[in-house]
Image: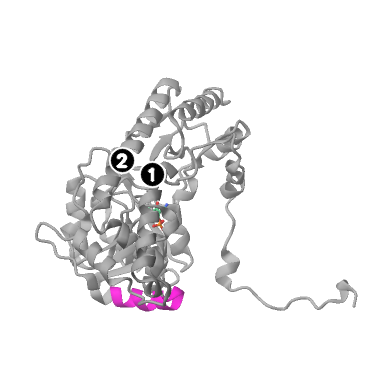
């Protein structure tokens, strides 16, 4: 049979899948894996922070102690000793989190998807920060919400802007109080208290996504929303930034009614997070390893952030502004109004420097003059070289 005579396929994609688009930015950033590229785009933890010896020893212990259990199917909710460890970690100062509220997930990215599955119908109102985590928008968008952007400033989300007209009928509010991706903003205590109060009113679940909380350069954490309203907050945690992201171990702490729905949704998705990696994580951390390891991660990022800020101060022309992060992996930059950060990306990739334009982090009106610089995987010397190239492009940009 001639290939041209083959019947045309008659199968159809779902409407949902038909709406999925590839991002222009992803196409441009494909080149950033080339070694000559100085990439401020990645958002990856530094491989220098991966505790390879400790993970290897933990893996050996898992196989020595109970290899069969590590290789067998396991409960959807997660490995009980790990759930107990997580619950204890978040219980202090009169707050008690129960292990039965903890669901171990395949990275906290899965928690975003599960929350979308159980809370969002087409056109449901979903409240997000301005800007917010691109991966959260991608996850929620599978369930076709109508986003309402909550006004935010240099200190993060503005609770006073959560008026009845904005929040009416909302299914959830998604927020990152600590060193937010993409802006590295940290929400001040008074705003945390105001948000906890809103959560207590119970009109919609408040989702606190906290993968960067431990990366606080001074080691002076502010209270989580979870600790302020433990019965009302849905909290996402992750081992990606404090151990390694390839483990794919995260968790969600939720009130029991919601926890049960998340478990049902997860069961249909992947039965459970790999029990092997859950056991390895537990074996690695159970005797206090994070207390010695996390300060080394913080110190590295503090140093790299300082190098980035010094380079920006030295090189950037007037009209460019940025924040001074107190933790995390990013600096958020605002360009003069005549420069669109998407156009700047094309020009800078041609000169071997990459970053992520702000646009995809906005649910509604895109911030065309903003961009995210991630310094976690770049040495101070390359940070300087990359910032010099960006600064020259910005200074010479035609008006
Ligand atoms: N939330 C935020 C805000 C993130 O930045 C990330 C990772 N970039 C995630 C969730 C997902 O992390 P993981 O699935 O590795 O836990």
Q: Quadrant of ligand 1?
A: bottom left
Q: Is residue 376 above or below residue 144?
A: above
Give me the C-alpha separation between circle 2 and circle 1.
8 Å
12 left or right, relative to 371: right
Q: Tell me the quarter of the image containing the N terminus.
A: bottom right
Task: Determine the image quadrant of residue 100.
Answer: bottom left
* Residue ID at (40%, 75%): 68
338 left or right, relative to 165: right
Residue 154 sits inside the magenta stretch: no
Residue located beneath label 1 in the image: 49
Q: Is residue 353 above or below residue 289?
A: above
* Residue ID at (45%, 62%): 139
Q: Residues within 10 Å of mark 2 (few under 14, many from 20)?
A: some
Q: Mark 2 and mark 1 in contact? Answer it, CB < 8 Å.
A: yes
Q: Which stretch appears magenta?
A: 259-271
Residue at the outermost right position: 2
Q: Is residue 37 above or below residue 19?
A: above
Q: Is residue 83 above or below residue 154?
A: below
- Give the image location of residue 295, x and y in percent: 27, 42
* Residue ID at (36%, 55%): 57
Closer to the chain start, of discs 2 and 1, is 1
Residue at the outermost front position: 64
Residue located beneath label 2 in the image: 296
Task: Determine the image quadrant of residue 205.
Answer: bottom left
Q: Main secondary structure of the magenta part?
A: helix
Q: Which mark is residue 133?
A: none
- Give the image location of residue 150, x and y in percent: 33, 53
């Amino acid at each position: 049979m001639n290939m041209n005579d083959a019947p045309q396929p008659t199968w159809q994609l779902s409407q949902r899948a038909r709406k999925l688009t590839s991002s222009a930015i992803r196409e441009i950033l494909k080149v950033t894996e080339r070694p000559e590229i100085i990439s401020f785009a990645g958002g990856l933890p530094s491989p220098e922070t991966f505790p390879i010896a400790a993970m290897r020893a933990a893996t050996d212990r898992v196989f020595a102690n109970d290899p069969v259990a590590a290789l067998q199917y396991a409960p959807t909710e997660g490995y009980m000793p790990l759930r107990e460890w997580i619950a204890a970690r978040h219980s202090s100062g009169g707050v008690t989190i129960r292990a039965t509220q903890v669901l171990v997930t395949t990275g906290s990215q899965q928690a975003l998807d599960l929350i979308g599955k159980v809370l969002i119908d087409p056109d449901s109102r979903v409240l997000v920060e301005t800007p917010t985590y691109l991966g959260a928008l991608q996850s929620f968008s599978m369930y076709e919400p109508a986003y309402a952007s909550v006004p935010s400033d240099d200190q993060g989300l503005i609770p006073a802007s959560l008026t009845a007209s904005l929040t009416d009928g909302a299914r959830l509010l998604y927020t990152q109080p600590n060193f937010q991706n993409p802006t590295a903003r940290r929400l001040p205590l008074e705003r945390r208290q105001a948000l906890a109060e809103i959560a207590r009113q119970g009109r919609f679940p408040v989702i606190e996504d906290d993968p960067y909380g431990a990366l606080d350069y001074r080691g002076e954490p502010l209270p989580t929303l979870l600790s302020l309203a433990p019965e009302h907050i849905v909290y996402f945690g992750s081992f990606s930034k404090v151990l390694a992201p390839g483990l794919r171990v995260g968790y969600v702490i939720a009130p029991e009614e919601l926890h049960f729905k998340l478990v049902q949704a997860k069961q249909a998705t992947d039965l459970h997070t790999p029990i092997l990696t859950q056991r390895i994580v537990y074996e690695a951390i159970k005797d206090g390893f994070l207390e010695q390891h996390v300060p080394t991660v913080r110190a590295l990022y503090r140093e790299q952030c300082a190098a980035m800020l010094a380079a920006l101060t030295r090189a950037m022309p007037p009209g460019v502004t940025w924040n001074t992060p107190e933790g995390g992996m990013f600096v958020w930059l605002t360009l003069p109004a005549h420069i669109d950060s998407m156009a700047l990306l094309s020009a800078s990739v041609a000169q071997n420097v990459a970053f992520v334009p702000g646009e995809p982090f906005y649910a509604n009106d895109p911030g065309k003059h903003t961009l995210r610089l991630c310094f976690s995987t770049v040495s101070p010397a390359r940070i300087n070289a990359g910032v010099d190239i960006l600064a020259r492009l910005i200074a010479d940009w035609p008006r």
